[in-house]
Amino acid sequence: MTRLIVGPFNRVEGDLEVKLDIQDGAVHEVQVVSPLYRGFERILAGKAPFDALVYAPRICGICSVSQSVAAAKALSAAMGLGMPANGERAVNLIHATENVADHLTHFYLFFMPDFARAVYQSEGWYEDARDRFTAIKGTAAQDVLPARAQFMHVLGLLAGKWPHTLTVQPGGSTRSVAAGEVARLAAILAAFRRFLERHLYGDRLERIAGLTSPDDLAAWASEKPATSSDFRRFLQYAQALDLAALGPSTGRYMSFGAYGTESAPLFDRGLFVNGTPGKLDPQQITEDLSHAWYAASNGPQAPFEGATQPDAERSEAYSWCKAPRLGGDVVEVGALARQLVHGHPLIRDLVAASGGNVYTRVVARVLEIALVVIAMEQWANELVPEQPFIEHGQLPDTGEGIGLTEAARGSLGHWLRIEKGRIANYQIIAPTTWNFSPRDENGVPGALEQALAGAPVRPGETEPVSVQHIVRSFDPCLVCTVH
């Protein structure tokens, strides 16, 4: 048995270390270590409830809108506050812009550069991958960075700034828009569509969104050379390297539901467990501290009762990440989970064929870009400038609320309890907390720890490329993880 410590990882958000026990050329056992403590939940204790809208977005600089949305939802639940239709559309657009930009950044700048590694120089596609995706220097970066910057102007129009906007509020958006701004918004989205259809897909967004099966996807990919689009390039690499055999999932997936309205979300809330859809009961969510550097609790605790008391001396602990569980089970969250829960036929068929893995996670993420941008065009078209964008209400002196939403990386929840007009407890469970959790009190590894078990390690590798692909397939955000 050989111990290999991989980290810090480049091209992931935050600090990550992975301890691997290698036996017979494969990963035998794993510890995923989040080595940073931040303590936002303790910072929020005792603050005025609306301060959560200022502090929570600063958990992260790349998914701050998701934190804003979750905080606003927790406050609106405590207030019993609704939202006008314009507010829903504006918040959807603000949130979707950040999530789509994150997906795009992950694909082009975090995930695809691994194919430009010298370990693949014997592959027939290597030179093209090196020229296209080498970090910073590749032609893909030259194409995607200006397009992403222009797309982010949506946030300038609707949110005033990014990150850490205060536009998203419990009752909607503080920023109304004029007719001319709606036209400008449409122009930005049209330009972004042109970039996607030219570079990422080489086809119409509707064609990608309408792919329904693995055979349909394969037939689409074969219509043109792999070099005709970056999605086709990925499909070529994935087939050559059998990425569907890397990073198997637990088979249990969860989504809190995304965009749209509570009664009619764009992507549904629910579960998808071993091929069967099911309903989600948030009351089954607990956090286990048995292997995390926090003061021991009397078993797993529901978030409303949870505590964040750091204890770096615990000998049995190895991470600052808590271990969230749903009904005691590990679940995976992210774009793959969202599309499985929602029932997209392509993703359900891919998972039925090969399970959740590196390949299906990336396909789901790339598919979701098309699905969401099409929806964004509709929301922008439905904005009515002369109608309200926000409702106001009274914050109770005592109350509680849960804010559940979907960040790019998966399910994000904020649990808020108010006593005597102040925050008595604030607990957050971020997407990567679910995916990168340590073991629980029963010794069950988290989703990434299970996905890494069995990964092949080539002789002499100190940073196994299989491990790099698996870790990055989850698109981790470690600063959110250790909030």
Image: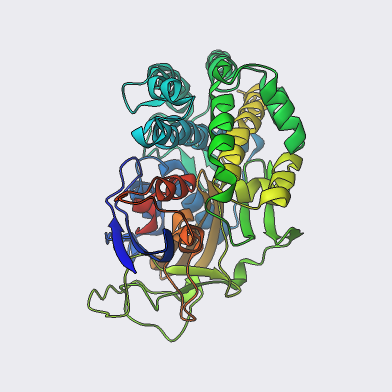
Q: Residue at x 62, y 41 (%)?
A: 259
| x then y, percent, for residue 196 | 56, 20
The residue nearer to you, when weighing 147 against 363, is 363
**Quadrant of the rendered image containing residue 131:** top left
Q: Is residue 325 visible?
A: yes
The residue nearer to you, when weighing 154 against 207, is 207
**Looking at the figure, which quarter contains the N terminus?**
bottom left
| x then y, percent, for residue 363 | 60, 38
Residue, far left:
313
Query: Please, is residue 429 above or below residue 211 in the view?
Result: below
Q: Residue at x 33, y 28 (%)?
A: 135
| x then y, percent, for residue 209 | 70, 30
Q: Is residue 171 left or right of residue 475?
A: right
Residue, far bottom:
298
Colour scheme of this structure image? Answer: rainbow
Q: Residue at x 22, y 78 (%)?
A: 313
The residue nearer to you, when weighing 233 against 378, is 233
Q: Residue at x 41, y 34 (%)?
A: 120
Total tally of numbered discs in the picture: 0
The residue nearer to you, when weighing 340 against 111, is 111
Query: Please, is residue 104 above or below residue 364 in the view?
Result: above
Q: Is residue 278 left or right of residue 258?
A: right
**Looking at the figure, which quarter contains the C terminus?**
bottom left
Query: Please, is residue 229 above or below residue 116 in the view?
Result: above
| x then y, percent, for residue 279 | 72, 62
